[in-house]
Amino acid sequence: MPRTLAPEQCAELTPTSSPLAELDADVVVVTAGTDASGVLALAEDALAIDRASGGALRAALERGGFRPAWAAQRFVNLPGTPFGAVLVVGTGPEGGRETGPAGGDPGALRVTLRERRHALAAGVAGLTGGRVAVCAGGAWDTLLVEAAALATYRFDRYSDRPRPAELLVSCARLPGEDELAELSSRLRSVCFARDWVNLPGGHKRPEASTALLLEEAGSSGVEARVWTTEELAALGAGGLVGVGQGSAEPARLVRLTARGTNGGPPLVLIGKGLTYDAGGVNLKTTWLEHMKLDMGGAAACAGAVFHAGRRPRGRTVVAWIALAENLMSATSYLTGDVLRMHAGTSVEVTNTDAEGRLALADAMSIADAGNAAALLTVATLTGSAIMSLGPRTAAVHSADDRLSAQLLDSAAAAGESAWRLPHLPYLAESLRSHIADLSNVGTPQGQSMVAAEFLRHFAPAGVPYLHVDLAGPAYNMGEPYDGVPAGGTGYGVRTLIELVDRL
């Protein structure tokens, strides 16, 4: 029987060809919804359990008045079966899932992405121990298994947070060793990103984060190079150095390279790694307890390149991680300062809390990506993206229709929600400064798009460029949903993994 161990933050994963109703499990998780008439409709996995129990499952649900709204849950004990209990999770009305347009093509991409696999994951996420079983259908459904496995993730570095010990997955066609190795690597990368985001800011300052990246690079077959703040200053990287100068641990830049097999142009990723963002002298007044999240873009890029190192692709993947801590101190950069960027551009700082674009711009310039197949910046960059699209959808910015379509297709394939916002060149005009080449803020309206215009100034000519603002979905400030945990979500890792194979 093929078997793989998921990362230590998840349950052990065991595929099996045994029918769901015959598995020796503590809890079997199945789904149910309602048909067009509003009548309880059991999904195939639940029907299998109902048949094995002689109709006892349906009878218990109907007797208890179970209403299978989205993610509603009901435990049912079925004596005489191999499993201890059945957890039924609601999927709502058949055909009632929300969908929406992307890139101007109505219906081309689901926005909420609520499907059966997310309902199953929501059920699995609430379980705290034992052997849990789910059904992946007739064939190995990678996304369903991935969602269920990631739902067993727990960040338990500082407290005992129990998780299921084993996840049994019933499917008619078992996966091959290569499929299992691919899935295991994807899980490891997402869990790495979640762990890094979840670490308190004081435990992942630039030096500690650099060490963490180097350790994972060494075990993933990824080449690494680090630039110290002294080296960055010598290069003229006034943006990244300036952002970090208020911290006792100055900025660093880390390059991670996963070599491909075909020798073609690389995919270059630039990740914002603000290990903590207090806002600088423009001190934040809200969400300070969550500001360890501001390296979610760096975590997504690192997770993707580590996967490419463990599972080499045709294309080389290079991730540049800009690490800094934006604090208020006697040495902080100030509002009104003018910074000289690595590209030679002078930037007037009109708000020290618009620091991510300064760090990214220097990393973009130093990366010298003129020969890249594509250049992406990935960052928890603006609250504007959350205000525009809500907390579960990333904003995509690009003037390149083909690259935008590839990114959105990759997000859909990964089960992650992304939406393309318009490219509006006139917003770049608001970035003009009276005393420097650029201002770092511009108009307060449409800041996600304005920030994208700022970054576009530093992108190499002729190279497809795209910016992902994942300020919302990279970190869940609320309760778990659809199998997504509170805190770091690992959003973006799987989308970037998918993108590598689509370029």
Image: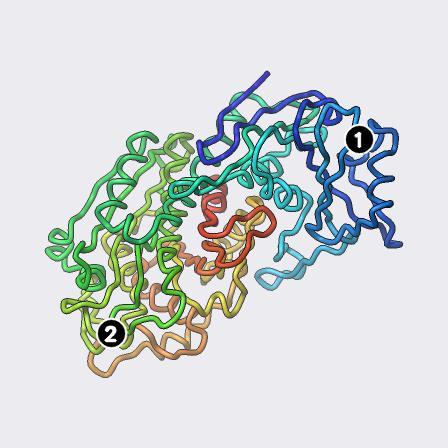
Please rate how many residues cluster around mark 1, counting C-alpha atoms within 10 Å: few if below 14, some from 14 to 19, many from 20: some
Which residue is under mark 1? 48
Q: In this view, does 179 lie above or below 339?
A: above
Which mark's residue is nearer the viewer, 1 or 2? 1
- Place of residue 15 in the rendered image (x, y in percent of width and height, measured from the top left): 61, 24
Q: Is residue 27 above or below residue 268?
A: above
Please name the amino acid that badge 2 sits on: Val
Left/right of residue 331 with respect to residue 265 in the rendered view = left
> What kind of element bears circle 2?
loop
Question: In the rendered view of the protein, which quadrant contains the N terminus?
Answer: top right
Please name the amino acid that badge 1 sits on: Ala
Q: Earlier in the sequence, mark 1 or mark 2?
A: 1
Q: How far apart are marks 1 and 2 (CA)?
A: 63 Å
Instruction: Single out the residue that lies furthest toward the top.
Output: 1
> What kind of element bears circle 1?
helix
Which residue is under mark 2? 349
